[in-house]
Amino acid sequence: MNLRNRPIFRVLLPLLTYLLILYASSRTGAALERIDLKIPDSILHFLEYCLLSLSLQPLLRNRRFSLVITLSLVALLAGMDEGLQSLVPGRHCSIRDGSMDLLGGATGWLLVRWWKKSPPAS
């Protein structure tokens, strides 16, 4: 059996991705100011949850409901992330960030669907 097909590896990637998101969310406002990535916060939210959505796709075998499941998981995890941010000094909960999280999740789902439908390179 191929290692990539083992369930633990399909679960491990989204779990690690979300743990990285939580780590970034738990940083104080002062700690984030020292990093100064020159990337808008909304773009970072979009990219984080696009990556999370991409990492979730190997777990979702039911194509019919994969969008609903993906967006539900992204909404749940983004809500927990925003809730955590509201408890961190110098951070706050934002509807705009949550919207960008959902948009990133939907984009990740669309990228996987597009990639699966594109013909193989010859």
Image (tube, helix red, strand yellow):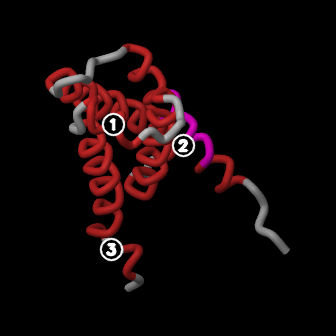
Toward the viewer: 98 or 14? 98
Q: Where is residue 110 in the image (x, y as percent from the top left)?
A: 60, 40
Residue type, label 3? Arg
Q: Residue at x 43, y 58 (%)?
A: 58
**Structural crowding at the residue carrying mark 3, measured as other residues with C-alpha within 10 Å and reported as few (<14), some (14–19) or many (≥20):** few
* Residue marked by disc 2: 108
Magenta span: 103-111
Q: Main secondary structure of the magenta part?
A: helix
Q: Which of marks 2 and 1 is in front?
A: 1
Toward the viewer: 17 or 91? 91
Quadrant containing the C terminus is bottom right
Alpha carbon separation for disc pair 1 and 3: 37 Å
Residue type, label 2? Gly
* Residue marked by disc 3: 6
Marks 2 and 1 close (CB-CB < 8 Å) = no
Alpha carbon separation for disc pair 3 and 2: 22 Å
User: Is residue 87 left or right of 55 when viewed as pictured?
Assistant: left
